[in-house]
Amino acid sequence: MHKIAVIPGDCTGPEVTGEAMKVLKAASEKFGFTYELTEYDFGYDRYSRTGEILPPEALKEFRHFDTIFLGAIGHPDAPEGVLEKGIILQTRFELDLYINLRPVKLYRSQDCPLKDKGPEEVDFVVIRENTEDLYTGAGGVFKKGTDDEVAIQESINTRKGVERCIRYAFEYTRKRNKRKKLTLCHKSNVLTYAHDMWRRVFTEIGEEYSDVETDAAYVDATCMWMVKNPEWFDVIVTTNMFGDIITDLGAIIQGGLGVAAGGNINPDSVSMFEPMGGSAPRHAGKNRINPIAAIGACQMMIAQLGEDDAAVAVDRAIVETVNKMDAMEAGKMGYSTTEVGDLVATAI
């Protein structure tokens, strides 16, 4: 029995979560695994009623689940960043979800904005360190609001954090078993302290993986090659900040945020899976948002739970469904949100 915590979240979050759970049900019935869902109402509605964002007892409860599914967090009426930091970042840090796993997979050529690039050229994975760097909140402000204001934001990189992320990336590249090539995305020519450590650790660990080809690229060059020659990449490993940026670029070249799914991984404990598109408030309640990203996140969750055959079937069902859709943009799919979920569930 897989124990799954579900946070539908804000705006379109509950809509896409509903379709992901529909697909989970279809996969479980087809492949004979069982699960138990526990839903949590964290998000703007609870915050606006009670002022509560994510109570400490919830984080304790999360540790007893096998996995967490997050629909989306964010609301235009909430103070900027309060919900995102209070729920998403807090969960990442407290549960030590130190890997952000982002497949960049194009399902069909017409959804890619790059000339002459198809599914064979756009199929790589970004592994982003998820609990350090500029996101730790280290720094401060002095003389705020005056002409002499000083704002400092510090990038924190520990040997432990860097090493475990890079080692996970090597293991993942080996297990993925495609080109078996791992690229370090960095900026050591300017960020000479932190990124020198990334390069040294990458080189040291790489000596243990003679079957994995390695290379390195500055982050600006990485962005350039992602657009010009995405087929060069198999797996990319990078810092928290750079990963945040290049995964959005990856989402666009794979067809948009409507198909981009991701996982926040602790390999030894509970992990959390989510669509990358955010809460999309202007589409809320209209049954027109694309649920493929949420269904893709569900597929990643099923794989993490060890249900490999079911995960493969869901991936195939996504491909089959996407090839029936007119477009990936909300309201232009040719189907409603619920109809897309029905198509995937039926294809399973």
Image (tube, helix red, strand yellow):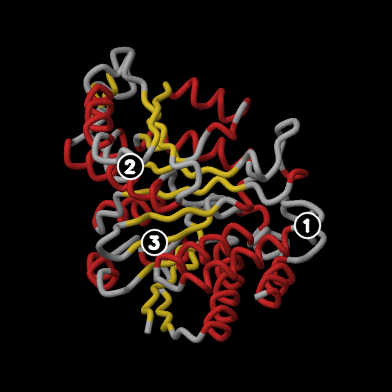
- Location of residue 321 in the rendering, given as x and y in whole percent from the top left corner: 73, 64
- Location of residue 19 in the rendering, given as x and y in whole percent from the top left corner: 61, 71
> In the rendered image, is residue 248 in sight?
yes
- Location of residue 319 in the rendering, given as x and y in whole percent from the top left corner: 68, 60
Task: Name the residue located 48 percent from the left edge and 21 percent from the top edge.
Answer: 220
Task: Name the residue located 26 percent from the left edge and 59 percent from the top edge.
Answer: 95
In front: mark 1 or mark 2? Answer: 2
Q: Which quadrant does the C terminus fall into?
A: bottom right
Instruction: Determine which residue is flagged by label 3.
Output: 272
Of the image marks 1 and 2, the number of the one nearer the N terminus: 2
Q: Secondary structure at mark 2?
A: strand
Q: How many residues crowd around disc 1 within 10 Å: few (fewer than 14), some, or many (20 or more)?
A: some
Q: Secondary structure at mark 3?
A: strand
Q: Marks 2/3: CA distance?
A: 15 Å
Give amino acid for label 2.
Glu
Compare residues 37 and 58 and report the one nearer the observer.
Answer: 37
Give amino acid for label 3.
Met
Q: Does residue 263 lie above or below 224 as drawn?
A: below
Compare residues 264 and 164 and report the one nearer the observer.
Answer: 164
Instruction: Determine which residue is flagged by label 2.
Output: 129
Q: Which mark is residue 333?
A: 1
> In the rendered image, is residue 49 in sight?
no
- Location of residue 138 in the rendering, given as x and y in whole percent from the top left corner: 22, 34
Q: Does residue 286 lie above or below 96 as drawn?
A: below
Q: In the displayed structure, does residue 65 sit left or right of residue 250?
A: left
